[in-house]
Each structure stands twice: as C-alpha cells, then as structure tokens.
C-alpha cells in the first residue's frame, strides 16, 4: 500500500511508437486536502476509486489504496467532484524491464506530458529513455490534484 513513484516531463512524442496501450482517463477529486486525496477515475471501461496519503518530503513515497468500482458508480461520483475534471490519455511504455506510464493531458492541460515510473525501492536505479526529460518528483504543481485546480494553460 506504499507507492514509490518518480515523475518526469516528456520531451518528445517518440514514446508513442513504443507504447503497448493507450487509454482515455477522466478523473476528478472528491477531496484534495494535502494530508489525503480521494480520486475517482474512469479509465476506459473501468471505474477506480483511489485514496492517497501525504507524500514524503522528497515526493517519492506515499500511502495509496485503490479499488475498482462499477463504471456506472464512478461516472456518478465524477459529478460530485471538486471543480477541475482532468482528461488525459495514458500510454503504457515498457522500457528496459520497467514500465513507464505517460500521461498526455487534454483540455485546459493540453501541452503537458508527464511520465511516471513505479519502483520497488526508493533508491532503485533504472534506465532512462531518450524522451524522458526533467524530473519533477515532489514538485506539487505537477500533482494531478493541483493540476485540476491550476491547469497548465494558466502557468
């Protein structure tokens, strides 16, 4: 239940040629308190409810609990979310025995493309693909809960 994750900006769309899947995600937040966030997500034909705790000081680790919920219920919960629904395409890209998830944001966040990699250990090393740019792990403005309130178009 502890998520170890690092985030990076993406410098080109070269990752799209390597992607094994592309899913439309629509998500909103029922709660964006800094100590805990509660997210509702429609990912393709799945509904997902996620609770995340406060991030570590460096932003690499935090509590995460996630469960699949009926799609119909997820769509209803989206209607109760705080202002700022996020839409994005998520690409899964295997690279050097790891999996990168790349989010290409739409709407008010169009132009923002970020990659995430989940790790087994905080100090785990991994190979970086050529399209991986600046690391933004721990930079709160890149958290989806913050992007929903202050979209990329306003930066």
Image (spheres, grey):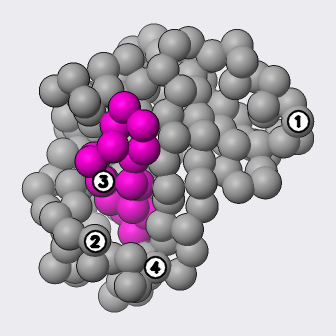
Q: Is residue 110 magenta?
A: yes
Q: Residue furthest left?
A: 134
Q: Which of 33 and 113 lies nearest the eye of the viewer?
A: 113
Q: Position of residue 122 (x, y in %)?
A: 29, 56
For label 4, the residue is 19
Q: Which residues are magenta?
A: 98-118
Snapshot quadrant of residue 116: bottom left
Secondary structure beneath dot 4 equals loop
For label 3, the residue is 114
Q: Which of 37 and 64 lies nearest the eye of the viewer?
A: 37
For label 2, the residue is 13
12 over 76 or under it: above or below: below
Q: Earlier in the sequence, mark 1 or mark 4?
A: 4
Which residue is drawn at the image coordinates 18% and 45% (left, top)? Answer: 136
Distance, label 3 to label 1, CA atoms, is 28 Å
Which residue is drawn at the image coordinates 16% and 64% (left, top)? Answer: 11
Q: Earlier in the sequence, mark 3 or mark 2?
A: 2
Mark 4, Cα crowd under 10 Å, few <14 / some 14-19 / many 20+, is some
For label 1, the residue is 72
Distance, label 3 to label 2, CA atoms, is 11 Å
Q: Position of residue 78 (x, y in %)?
A: 69, 24
Distance, label 1 to label 4, CA atoms, is 28 Å
Q: Nearer the viewer, mark 2 or mark 4?
A: 2
Q: How many marks?
A: 4
Q: Is residue 109 magenta?
A: yes
């Amino acid at each position: 239940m502890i998520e170890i994750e690092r985030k990076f900006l993406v410098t080109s769309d070269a990752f799209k040629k390597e992607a094994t899947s592309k899913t439309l995600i629509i998500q909103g937040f029922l709660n964006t308190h800094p100590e805990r966030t509660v997210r509702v997500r429609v990912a393709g034909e799945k509904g997902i409810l996620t609770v995340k705790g406060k991030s570590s000081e460096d932003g690499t680790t935090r509590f995460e609990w996630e469960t699949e919920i009926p799609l119909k219920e997820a769509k209803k919960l989206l209607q109760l979310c705080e202002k700022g629904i996020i839409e994005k395409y998520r690409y899964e890209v295997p690279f050097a025995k790891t999996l990168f998830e790349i989010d290409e944001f739409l709407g008010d966040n169009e132009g923002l493309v970020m990659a995430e990699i989940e790790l087994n250990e905080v100090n785990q090393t991994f190979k970086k693909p050529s399209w991986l740019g600046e690391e933004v792990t721990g930079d709160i403005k890149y958290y989806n809960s913050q992007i929903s309130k202050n979209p990329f178009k306003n930066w």
